[in-house]
Amino acid sequence: MPSIYIFIILVSLPLNGLAMVTFTCRIREKKPAVIYMSHLACVDLLFILLLPLKIHYELNASNWVFGEAACRLLSAAHYGNMYC
């Protein structure tokens, strides 16, 4: 699974960055669809930035070393992104 997460990071980090630049700087007319798409790209970018913690957890034989608060944050973000 970590190899899939690494692939997701490598693909989606530049693409979400490009989407953020496009929706915030290039498109002048802020219609609801543009605002919605920029928010989706922003949330996806935030989720991608948490994936290295998930990779570390899985490569470290499911041993969490970042504390309980980070564990709760990562779990909420991971399952929230999956089901919401």
Image (cartoon, grey):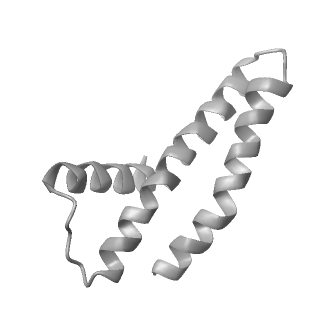
Question: Count the marks: how many?
Answer: 0
Q: Is residue 37 left or right of residue 66?
A: right
Q: Is residue 2 above or below residue 33?
A: below
Q: Is residue 9 above or below residue 55?
A: above
- Which residue is rendered at x = 70% and y = 36% of the image? 20
**Residue 13 percent across, percent down from the top left:** 64, 55
Q: Is residue 83 left or right of residue 72?
A: right
- Which residue is rendered at x = 55% and y = 73% of the image? 6
Pick whichever, 24 or 76, lies toward us.
24
| Quarter of image, res 23 | top right
- Residue extending furthest left? 68
- Residue extending furthest front? 65
Q: Is residue 15 left or right of residue 57?
A: right
| Quarter of image, res 31 | top right
**Residue 1 percent across, percent down from the top left:** 46, 81
Q: Is residue 54 above or below residue 32?
A: below
Q: Is residue 26 left or right of residue 15?
A: right
**Residue 39 percent across, percent down from the top left:** 59, 32
| Quarter of image, res 51 | bottom left
- Residue extending furthest bottom? 61
**Residue 8 percent across, percent down from the top left:** 60, 67
- Which residue is rendered at x = 65% and y = 66% of the image? 10
- Which residue is rendered at x = 42% and y = 55% of the image? 50
